[in-house]
Amino acid sequence: MSDLTYSFVYDRAQAATVFQEIGIQGLILAMLARIPAQSAWEGCLVYSGEAPENDGAMICIGTRGPGAAEVQEQIVSAFEATGIPVPAIYEGGPEPRVELARAKDGRWATP
């Protein structure tokens, strides 16, 4: 797997106003349902990690592996299209804390 990692943060409270009572993985899976997994992304990991601010209000989502930059761009676009702002986007990111999904056989699979 490639070492390329990208990440972004979103505000937990703002996301809860759009998607009530849904956890981080459920939210990411809802966003990924809008994004067909490309064959070039095979093995790309989508995960949560420690947010740079680490104040509990922000959630950090990382992408690592083949197509990580494109996957991040697509997820950020899906967030913004549903009304969840993404205040910061990063090149690089934290180590994975929780694996949320991985591109496998042209689909998004959960661990």
Image (cartoon, rainbow, N blue to C red):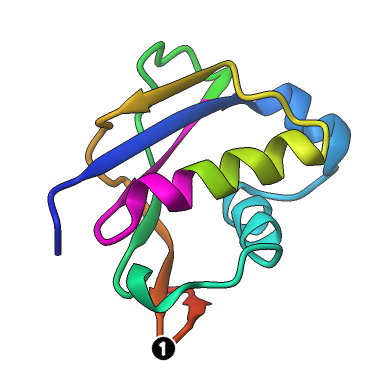
Give the camera-side residue of 32 and 25.
32
Which of the 4 image quadrants contains residue 36?
Answer: bottom right
> Where does residue 22 sit, x and y in percent of width and height?
74, 50
* Picture mark count: 1
Tell me which residue sits at (24%, 57%) in the image.
Answer: 65
> Where does residue 12 sit, x and y in percent of width and height?
66, 27
Is 68 inside the magenta-drawn segment?
yes
Give the camera-side residue of 50 and 38.
38
Q: Is residue 64 found left or right of 31 in the rendered image?
A: left
Tell me which residue sits at (73%, 23%) in the image.
Answer: 13
> Where does residue 43 sit, x and y in percent of width and height?
29, 72
- The answer to whether residue 64 is above or below residue 9 is below
> Where does residue 30 sit, x and y in percent of width and height?
71, 59
Amino acid marked by disc 1: Asp
- The answer to whether residue 101 is above or below residue 79 is below
Label 1 Cα neighbours within 10 Å, binned few <14 / some 14-19 / many ≥20: few
Give the camera-side residue of 86 and 55.
86
Which of the 4 image quadrants contains residue 53?
Answer: top left
- Secondary structure state at the residue bearing disc 1: loop
Figure quadrant of the C terminus: bottom left
Tell me which residue sits at (51%, 42%) in the image.
Answer: 73
Q: Is residue 109 found left or right of 104 in the rendered image?
A: right
**Residue furthest to the bottom:** 105
Tell me which residue sits at (28%, 46%) in the image.
Answer: 96
Q: Is residue 86 found left or right of 98 in the rendered image?
A: right
Figure quadrant of the N terminus: bottom left
- The answer to whether residue 69 is above or below residue 31 is above
Is 40 inside the magenta-drawn segment?
no
Instruction: Name the residue that disc number 1 marks.
Output: 105
What range of the chain is rendered magenta?
Answer: 59-72
